[in-house]
Image (cartoon, rainbow, N blue to C red):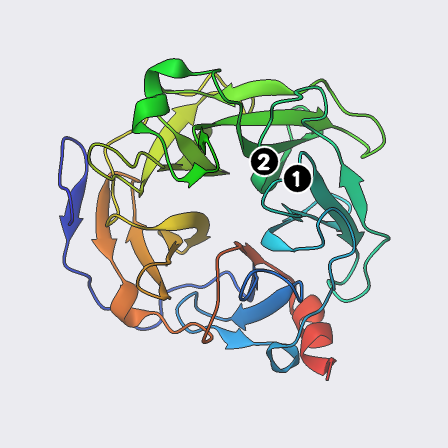
């Protein structure tokens, strides 16, 4: 069911104008299945048609945590180095981290125990990394359930795992050098079960896309927007949803005058998307999108033509 509430208006998708400026090429990092075989990459020149790289075989096999590589998020730093974080397992209290200059050759994988100080932490899901130029530091943030921590929303929570109802909030650390990290802090709590945060910057504002993971009494499972003047927040209350329900894993690209947001319609077995000029009025573009078969969510990001040429040369 689509919702059109308050500032959010869902409109029929328009055809992308011929000759629209593109800032590509772009790469999409993703996983397949349960993330067992690791990192997959696809490329696009226009943000609409995505083609597999390396014959859709893995570029990096998971080696840390429970040895999964789900939700791979890639961020390029100011020195050109790519940094990637990922979910290493369903019930791990840490996340994976690796670095690369070309997205082909990767550093030794590290496991960062970001929730080790919380003995009841159930998981560390969908970590993301964002470089904040004004503070010259990276934010790494993810979703965790700590039973009993947010009792008001436990009855509206997510899936049941054993005797625990998953009731996530977003947590984060900062680092400037990937050697020392700040203490883990609560990042986003708007009074609902929330996962899959991702941050972009637009016109001086920090835009955080989040998934409302509320399952009861009525399932939300949709994408909303919060904003801030600082990367570390505080962030505003979330907007009404601008997507259909039962989607997750948003990632955003600025292409021409539009923000494109892709999300994983996991119950429908496909990637879907929407675009907006102002992050308020949205049009659905799912029927214009072509993604590799079996793709699950990750991160869309711009690369140089040289980086893409190197990726295409890998057989």
Image point 57% across, 62% down: which residue? 31
Instruction: Give above or below for 215 relative to 35.
Output: above
In this rendering, would 218 be left or right of 118?
A: left
Q: Secondary structure at mark 1?
A: loop
Question: Does any portion of residue 237 appear in the rendered image?
Answer: no
Earlier sequence position, callout 1 versus callout 2:
1
Q: Secondary structure at mark 2?
A: loop
Tell which of 214 and 301 is nearer to you: 214
User: Circle 1 is placed at which residue position?
Assistant: 92
Crowding near the residue tagged with mark 1, few <14, some 14–19, many ≥20 C-alpha atoms within 10 Å: many
Percent x, y of residue 70:
59, 54
Crowding near the residue tagged with mark 2, few <14, some 14–19, many ≥20 C-alpha atoms within 10 Å: many
Question: Does any portion of residue 227 appear in the rendered image?
Answer: yes
User: Circle 2 is placed at which residue position?
Assistant: 123
Percent x, y of residue 40:
62, 67
Percent x, y of residue 134:
64, 26
Image point 74% across, 32% down: which residue? 113
Query: Quadrant of residue 150 in the image?
Result: top left
Image point 77% across, 29% down: which residue? 176
**Residue 106 badge:** none
Mark 1 and mark 2 residues within 8 Å of each other at the beta carbon: yes
């Amino acid at each position: 069911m689509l919702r059109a509430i308050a500032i959010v208006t869902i409109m029929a998708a328009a055809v992308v104008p011929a000759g629209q400026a593109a800032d590509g090429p772009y790469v999409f990092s993703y996983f397949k299945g349960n993330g067992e075989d690791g990192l997959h990459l696809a490329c696009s020149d226009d943000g609409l048609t995505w083609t597999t790289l390396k014959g859709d075989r893995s570029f990096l096999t998971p080696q840390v945590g429970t040895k999964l590589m789900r939700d791979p998020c890639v961020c390029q730093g100011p020195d050109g180095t790519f940094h990637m974080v990922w979910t290493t397992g369903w019930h791990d209290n840490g996340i994976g981290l690796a670095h690369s200059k070309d997205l082909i050759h990767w550093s030794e994988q590290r496991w960062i125990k970001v929730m080790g100080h919380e003995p009841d932490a159930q998981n560390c899901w969908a970590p993301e990394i964002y470089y904040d130029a004004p503070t010259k530091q990276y934010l790494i943030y993810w979703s965790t359930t700590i039973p009993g921590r947010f009792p008001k929303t436990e009855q509206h929570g997510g899936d049941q795992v054993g005797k625990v109802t998953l009731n996530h909030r977003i947590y984060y650390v900062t680092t400037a050098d990937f050697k020392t990290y700040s203490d883990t802090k609560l990042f986003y709590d708007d009074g609902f079960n929330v996962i899959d945060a991702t941050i972009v910057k637009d016109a001086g504002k920090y835009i955080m896309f989040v998934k409302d993971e509320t399952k009861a009494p009525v399932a939300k499972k949709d994408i909303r927007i919060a904003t801030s003047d600082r990367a570390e927040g505080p962030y505003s209350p979330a907007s009404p949803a601008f997507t259909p329900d039962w989607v997750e894993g948003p990632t955003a690209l600025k292409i021409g005058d539009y923000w494109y947001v892709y999300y994983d319609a996991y119950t429908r077995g496909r990637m879907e998307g929407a675009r907006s000029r102002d992050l308020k009025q949205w049009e659905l573009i799912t029927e214009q999108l072509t993604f590799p078969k079996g793709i699950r969510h990750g991160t869309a990001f711009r690369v140089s033509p040289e980086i893409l040429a190197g990726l295409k040369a890998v057989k």
